[in-house]
Every structure is written in structure tokens, then in C-alpha cells.
Image (tube, coloured by chain):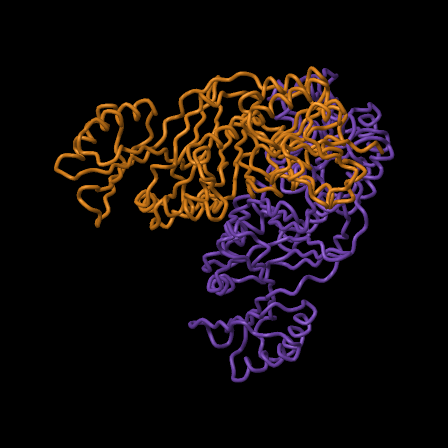
Chain colours: A orange, B purple
Amino acid sequence: MKTKPLSVALLGFGTVGGSVARIVCERPELADRIRLTHIFNRDVARKRVDWVPSSVAWTEDIDALLESKPDVVVEVIGGIAPAGDWVRRALGQGTAVVTANKMLLAAHGPELLDLAVRHETQLRFEAAVAGGVPLIHGVREGLAGDRLLRVTGILNGTSNYVLSAMSGGEQSMETVMVEARRLGYAEADPSADVDGDDAGAKLVVLAGIAFRRHLQLADIPRHSIRPISAPDFRYADRLGCTIRQVALVEARGDGFHAFVGPALVPRGSNFGLNMDANNIVTVAGHYGGENSFSGAGAGGPATAVAVVSDLLSLTQRERDRNEEWLPASVVAPPARPYYLRFVVKDRQGILSLIAASLADKGINLDAVLQEPGYPKDTLPFVITVEPCEEDALVAAVQEIATADFHAEPPLALPMLLGEARRT
Amino acid sequence: MKTKPLSVALLGFGTVGGSVARIVCERPELADRIRLTHIFNRDVARKRVDWVPSSVAWTEDIDALLESKPDVVVEVIGGIAPAGDWVRRALGQGTAVVTANKMLLAAHGPELLDLAVRHETQLRFEAAVAGGVPLIHGVREGLAGDRLLRVTGILNGTSNYVLSAMSGGEQSMETVMVEARRLGYAEADPSADVDGDDAGAKLVVLAGIAFRRHLQLADIPRHSIRPISAPDFRYADRLGCTIRQVALVEARGDGFHAFVGPALVPRGSNFGLNMDANNIVTVAGHYGGENSFSGAGAGGPATAVAVVSDLLSLTQRERDRNEEWLPASVVAPPARPYYLRFVVKDRQGILSLIAASLADKGINLDAVLQEPGYPKDTLPFVITVEPCEEDALVAAVQEIATADFHAEPPLALPMLLGEARRT
């Protein structure tokens, strides 16, 4: 069936926007399906490049662009305002939107999806999670036949770069972060990456795709990777594990357990083996077991592939099943083992005091690890505990933290031994 | 948009068919989208189960079934005849078909796709490659924006089970095969699995999806894993590698290089780490780099998820871009390094004779490996060669094979060091 190519207006000509334009211009075989008509950017004269055909209008005038009624608006500006208002205006006039904006979707996904339905148009966002990894098509369509149970991912390339570079147990986070900045893997302020907001927003989108439920980002516990130190990797190694920033969402009764933060994963699992800035997502289903998707999670060209794939998918469907993300609540995790790391000013009786606090909450010790060679006034050691409820663990750690022997606050990490699939 | 559920007739009630029925019956939320109306099987009385609703007609009468004009026929019988005729009849009357039949698609894919187009209906086959791994949705739609360069996969679970079980270098293939049969991973006659026809048919389907080109299965070189022995794993290990049955198709000029057979892959790559009966596929694109998909490649429930996902995708599209697989030719591989293993009745001068044959064809030695402890009359040793053309290598090996010192025919395996992504 031959139809007119979709007219496409591109909002934002940064790394991703530039790559989208390049793919569309470099692949003449796409010309009968999509046609770039506008490029919008602030200060657009500075952005203009000569390899974009002269038929494309460069503009700073968003009103005129929207009034020209393109078939699709591609939003790769990022941020909630003003991008969100422009996405709303486009959908509200029946213009389809392709976006890579995870923050916008995490905050306003249900409203935007509803707006698309009411105006009989489409909102697509393959690029919003894991860059070029075709997760949304794979999960929402390829696994539609399954009843999904859990989605576990490494969704932030910066954090994975930092943690995988530290995995030898020699380098400090500061050293690795300097290198990450030099290579362009980390921004000057890496807070959104290392503290979990970026992975959290992506997890909200993933939960929408996998479960059609909307979790509030504010409800998802996010733990920073900043407290992770070189000794943690050495202790993790003794446990057959390494440390990754993990994002997970799991159906639990009427709600969902959700978590973003550093966790121990088996060294030989596909999460433990996921290196550099790569992303990986494992989806567990009731019928089909576990499927994993991995690839470059970010970068202009990879993310642009996802945007162009979304554009092409718009050319081949007259309608799509309406997508709706219903509200959902975040509930406590299942009982699981934890890794507790203390850095203390050593003296007698510390271990018995910690053990007593844990026992008092009904938590059983599994292992106590103390390596030689550390200074006595900042002595790191590790206790692992048998599977326990998170509430009990948090209460015990809070009690232990009030003692006067700590050189650093205690650190508790979940041990995800079954969630990250062994290869 | 609310529409009537699709009526679905299931052809075949074996492992996969039974699982398809189970998912459809166990997931009431699917009832407004798909409705099972018929189950066809030979000797159907023997197959009847009580958990299928009484509204479903059990039948041995294919003519009556097709005449009832279901919206979709699910073909999970397998084999080219009579399944192919029934698929043709369904498509020819405008009935959509969902099939898991890789052999049928490999042999007649272009004809069947064309039949679907001419009768304005759909042919879907997510289950035909890598069971439950949502490759087709991921690659064809999620990576549509990229220009794909190469698809590399471990597509046969039986072969991967056998080779990964042998990877310690201790167990013979015979021993492992007995265990594979006991666990249900291998059939009484494993020829299609270990000799490469199964992976070859899947590779034809993958090439169709990734490149929209039809390679003839007969044109794809398929090498058996049967000659692989325990010493090969010990030598591979010394090269930082292990051995897997790899299937790959790569765009080369106007044609495609395609290959199925045992190959050396880096031990630490995601192919080297792919264990048991799991499948993995890595897709390399010009823009987005490499994406990998992995999961259970076979088994009733996983394959059934793919079938049900295809059914659900039929409920949400009024039309799909027509798919067409154009003819394509198979061309020679790029120059690559090879692993050559000889088992000889040892005597002086063997190495110099082999080296002379290789040098005569312009092939440079890279390493010579000979481990102690093997009997002198069946002495295995290994030569690796620098990247060379396949023609030259084959000619050299043929010449070497005419010598009288061989206790077993020489074995040449490609070393896929860049094709299998390092994790």
C-alpha cells in the first residue's frame, strides 16, 4: 500500500536531533515513508548544517511550526518545560509525537497518552529507555503474549561505566569519575546519573510498557552509588559478586516493588558482565521465562535509530491499541539477603553489638568478612545477612548507625542473586 | 477502539500448540482480543483436554475448519507438507496465518509473503526464530531505523547445550549427547540440530527479517559440530576462546556472507558465555552499533508466548507494511583467522609439510599449539593462521588432507573474534 510520506518536524538539533536528521538524509530508501520538513532549535542560525536538504525549514518559531500541522513532531529537546507544553500542543491538535524524553514521560505519561487517545493520534517513545536497545517493541509487542512478572535493568550508562571501571577493587570513584568525564560518559554534574533519577525515570517508563501501570518517580526508592568504594568491590568479589546500579520493578500482590540503586549481582551473571556504558534489561515472564536485551544505552546515533524506528512504525499502522497507564502503588520488596558494610574506628565489642541489633530484629547473619591490611581507624568490614524483610533491616541499620564507632555511615545493599540471570 | 475478538483456529496440539491454548485460556484479559474457536489435530480424541472451554471445536477435518473462515490460523504442526498446503489455503482465502514453522519459511517464505499481500492478509512468524526471544518485533520494528550490517546468532539450543557442556575439555561429545537426550534437549536423531539445518533455516528467516532478502538454505554452508572433540576445547581455551555453533549473515557488496557451524568465539564474549540451551542473537547496525537479544530459544511455553504475541499484534493493526523477501546471493566471507586442528600419527616433518602448504597459498601462521600427554598415534595439535581468504584456506587444507599422516581428517574452524561482542 503506497501512501504519502509522513511530514516530520524535528524539535531540537543537539546530539540526538542531529543524528535523527543524518539518518533520514543518508537513507534515501526512507524518502517514500518519511520526509523532514522543519528543524526547530533556539538560536537556529548557529545550528544550520549544509547536508540537510534546502527543502527543510530551519526555524525558531514553535507557533508557526505547530500551525503548519506536520504529521509528526519529534521532540528531542528534553526536560519537562517547555518541551512538555509543545508535546501537549502537538497531541492536542492531532499531531503524532515521537519523543526521547523520559523525564516528561515519567512525570506526565498517563496524561499525554490519554491526550493522544482523545485526539486519535499516537505518542511513541522507544528512544526514552535504553537508547537504541529496541526494548519497547520487544517487550510491548514481542512479549505481549506473556504475563510479565519482573523487569530488571541496568539503565544508566554513566553509573555502569563508573562501577564496572571500579570492579577491580583498586580505583576510587573519584579517579574513575574524572576519566568518565574525560571520555564524555559523565556530565560535570553527574547527580541525575549516579543518584538514580535518570534510571528511576526510565524505570517508570519501563513499568508503563511492561505492566501498563504508572508508578510515581517520587515513590521509587533511589539510592546513590556515591558511597560505593574500592573495598566494596573486594568484599563483593569474595562473595562471588560485583556491584551495579540496578533498576527493578516487580509485580507484588496489588502493587509493585520498585528500586533503583547499587546492588550486589553475581559476577558471572549478565548484569555482572555488563561493562562500560552498556545497558541491559531482563524481562521475566510467567510463561516464557527470562529474555534479555542489551546494547548501547545512549549516544546520538543509537538513540536516533530508536526515533527513526518509531517514525517508520507510524507509517505502517492506521491505528494502535490504545495505551493507558493506570495508577499503581509501590510496595515493599520480598525478603532478600543484604550486604552490610561498616567502616569503623576499631575497638572490642563492635561485632557483638551489631550482631545483637540484627538478632533483635530477627535477622540472621550469613557471613562476616574482614580483610587484613586496612587502617584500624577506618576499618571496613562486611556482614551478609540471610533473606529478611526490608523494614526489619532498615530498623536494625538505623539502630546500629547511632553507635559511636562508625568512621562512615553503614551501607546496606540488596543482594540480587536470582534477579540477575546467570549466563 | 473496541472491536470484535479475532477468531483463532489452532492447527496442531503438541507441545507448542498445547501451550498456546493454555495461555489463551489462562489469561481472561485476552478474551476481548482473541477467541479460540477450533483445535485441529490428527487423532484428535486422544488430544482432548478438559481445561479448554466447550465452545472450542476439536476437529480432524481441515477442510471444514478452513471453510469456517476463522480470522487467523495458527500453524504449529511443523514440516513442509502438509502444513505448507494448509498455510497456502488459509492465506489464499484471506485468513491471516501465525506460524512457528522455520523450515516452511526458509523454503517458501517469499511465495507465502507474496500470497499474503495479494490476498490482503498477514503472515506472522515471531515463533519461528529463537522461540520466545522477541527478535522479529525487536529487529524488524525496533531497529527499522538503522541500516543493518550483520546478524550473528546461537540459534540451536541442542548444539549449544552440547558444546557448552563440553567446554571444560573433559567430556566427549558422546557422553554429553547421552545426557542431552536424557534431559530432552536432544532428539533420538539430532542431525538437524548438530549438522546445522535447524540453525540454517532460522538464519534464512533472520536474513528475511533483517535484510528483506531470501537466501536459499542450500546455498548456506553448514558445518556439523560432530567433529568437535574434548581437545578442541582445551586448545580453544589456550587461545582465550571456546567453541559454539554460530549462525551468521553479513551484507557484503551486493550479496551476503552466510555461515552455520562450529566456530571459535572469545570465552568472555556474550556468545562464549551463552550456556545450556539458551539462544542469543546480536544485530550490528551502521548507526546504533550492536544490540543483543537472549533467552530461551525453544520449549512449548516460550514459543507459545511468541505465537500469542503475534496474535495480539494482529488485533491492533489494520494494515502492515508489506513484507517482501527479494532474492539474494551468498558470497565469500571476509578474510578472517582460522583454527586448524590436526590429529596425526606422529613422525618427523609433519609441521614443515603443513607450513609449506599454507605458505604456498599465501597463508601466514599465527600460532602452533601442541599440548603434552596425547598418544603418539593420535596426536592432536593446532595451528592458527592470520586472516586469510576462505578459498585459499580450503585449498591448503584439501592439499594437506591428502598426506598419509592423518589419524582424523583435518578440521578448520573460523575464529570469530570481532563478530561475537565482548561483554
Estimate the x, y position of residue B125 in percent, counting from the top left: 71, 37
Q: Count of labels shown?
A: 0
User: In this orientation, which residue lies closer to the viewer: A307 or B142?
Assistant: A307
- Residue located 45% across and 57% down the image: B168
Can you tell which quarter of the image residue B260 is in?
bottom right
Residue B58 appears in the picture as rendered: no
Seen as rendered, the residue at the extreme bottom is B348
Quarter of the image with the N terminus of chain A is: top right
Estimate the x, y position of residue B355 in percent, counting from the top left: 58, 79
Estimate the x, y position of residue A385 in percent, counting from the top left: 29, 33
Q: Is residue B4 left or right of residue A346?
A: right
- Residue located 58% across and 57% down the image: B418
User: In this orientation, which residue lies closer to the viewer: A327 or A406?
Assistant: A406
Q: Is residue B301 left or right of residue A255?
A: right
User: In this orientation, which residue lies closer to the viewer: A312 or A40?
Assistant: A40
Q: Is residue A26 above or below residue A388?
A: below
Q: Is residue A85 above or below residue B380?
A: above
Can you tell which quarter of the image residue B222 is in?
bottom right
Q: Is residue A206 left or right of residue B202?
A: left
- Residue located 77% across and 31% down the image: A7
Seen as rendered, the residue at the extreme left is A348
Q: Is residue B45 above or below residue B402?
A: above
Estimate the x, y position of residue A145 in percent, counting from the top left: 63, 28
